[in-house]
Amino acid sequence: MPRHMHLAAYLKTGPTALHGGGWRHPEARLDDIFEPSRYASIARTLEDACFDACFFADLFGLYDVHASSPDAYVRRGGQISFLDPMTVLPIMAAATSRLGLGATLSTTLFNPYHLARTLLSLDVLSKGRVAWNVVTSATELEALNFGLEGLPAKDDRYDMADEVVEACLKLWGSWDKDAFVMDKARGLFADPAKVHYANYEGRYVRTRGPLSIPQSAQGHPVLMQAGASERGRQFAARWAEVVFAMQRSKAEMKDFYTDLKGRLDAHDRRPDDCSILVQVSCVVGETEAIARERADYCNSLLDDELALATTSANVGVDMSRYDGVGDVAALQGNQGMQGSVDFLQQIQAAEKLTLSEAAKRTAASQIVGTARSVADQLEDLFVSEACDGFVVSPIVSPLSHEVFCRTVVPELQRRDLFRKAYAGRTLRDHLTER
């Protein structure tokens, strides 16, 4: 049986995703960002195309790293979470029956009992379709919003994340699968011998349990992660079932893929236990020329200040005040994401730009062409084992996802690179399907 790629959709509760100019496109929908119908519709579109999952990127606040103000993001339409994804995902769950549903939640900001209870509740109601995108938070603003004085050191945040995941897994195992009896005649609802305390105690977190919520159809939510630093890769190798990767070139993708897959054995995991999905944005046209024209038009809508503000937020350094002197990594403090720094430096090296110039060019990597040539490029990355699939990020929401599902997915299916129908019901079923 041929190996099939995995596809997940990158979403935001708003009109802007990774491409800061997409909301300005004439075909971008702005009138329905607070309407449940928007999210139900995109969920059905993705499920009709047999996507493994979608997930919401999230930030617990408004970015204000750039010029110490959220002005650029608010004024120029940056990537903002206008709604809590945990209130939107139930709407999407009700509109679908197979599509995986991912939420981004922080191990630094939320305690394990709250995380375990919230995520497993949705996993039970969706019949086993939830993923948790595990993040440790990368901006001081989030810490301040949650009453902390600042972020812990980066490695300490990952040490804490290890404990939070351990605690959640203990809580998710509170109820045995066969705990329910529901015998009215005997008056026995559930067997208390099959309900267990977690009694987890670590250096950073502790929780007693038991959780009041039973196991879901897939046992517990799928664990997803996007760390690119050395410590982030260690964390992913131990826990992640899905990794969201963001590299610029095929060679860099293959290096990341080989490195991370090679780390799994140390945790008694097989390479197939972790699917590595690379971020792509696709611009599709009836001809190569039309596709290129569309991409050029979309990119003309990008705003330099917003691009700079986005880079500032992602790397944790105010690029509006960066004078080109000093190592960005040294200026970050406890903020910033290593993957974003790597991506910035990849652009700088490939295009021979200064760091400040590269900071204005960090729109997501784009694959441009006809449905056939886009599929050619995705196929090449997949079969050469640069990835196990893709996180598809829209430029124009929701149009980009609709076009991809209508044009590129059928081409991938025709080549037997992607499923034509779901074989299982849960997200973990989709990810273990080969």
Image (cartoon, rainbow, N blue to C red):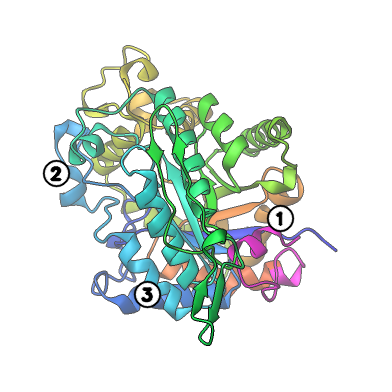
| Residue beneath disc 1 | 379
Q: Secondary structure at mark 1?
A: helix
Q: Which residues are magenta?
A: 413-434
Foreground disc of the pair 2, 3: 3
Q: Residue at x 63, y 38 (%)?
A: 253
Q: Residue furthest front?
A: 186
**Image: 403 above or below 199:** below
Drawn side of residue 258 relative to residue 108, left or right: right
Q: How many neighbours does mark 1 have within 10 angstroms: few (below 14), some (14-19), or many (20 or more)?
A: some
| Residue beneath disc 2 | 71
Drawn side of residue 185 relative to residue 113, left or right: right
Q: Position of residue 46 (x, y in %)?
A: 52, 71
- Front-most of residues 206 and 396: 206
Work out whether mark 1 precedes mark 2 in sequence or the reverse, and give the earlier one. Answer: 2
Query: In this figure, what is the number of numbered marks?
Result: 3
| Residue beneath disc 3 | 91
Marks 2 and 3, how far apart at CA: 31 Å
Q: Position of residue 177 (x, y in %)?
A: 60, 65
- Front-most of residues 300 and 319: 319
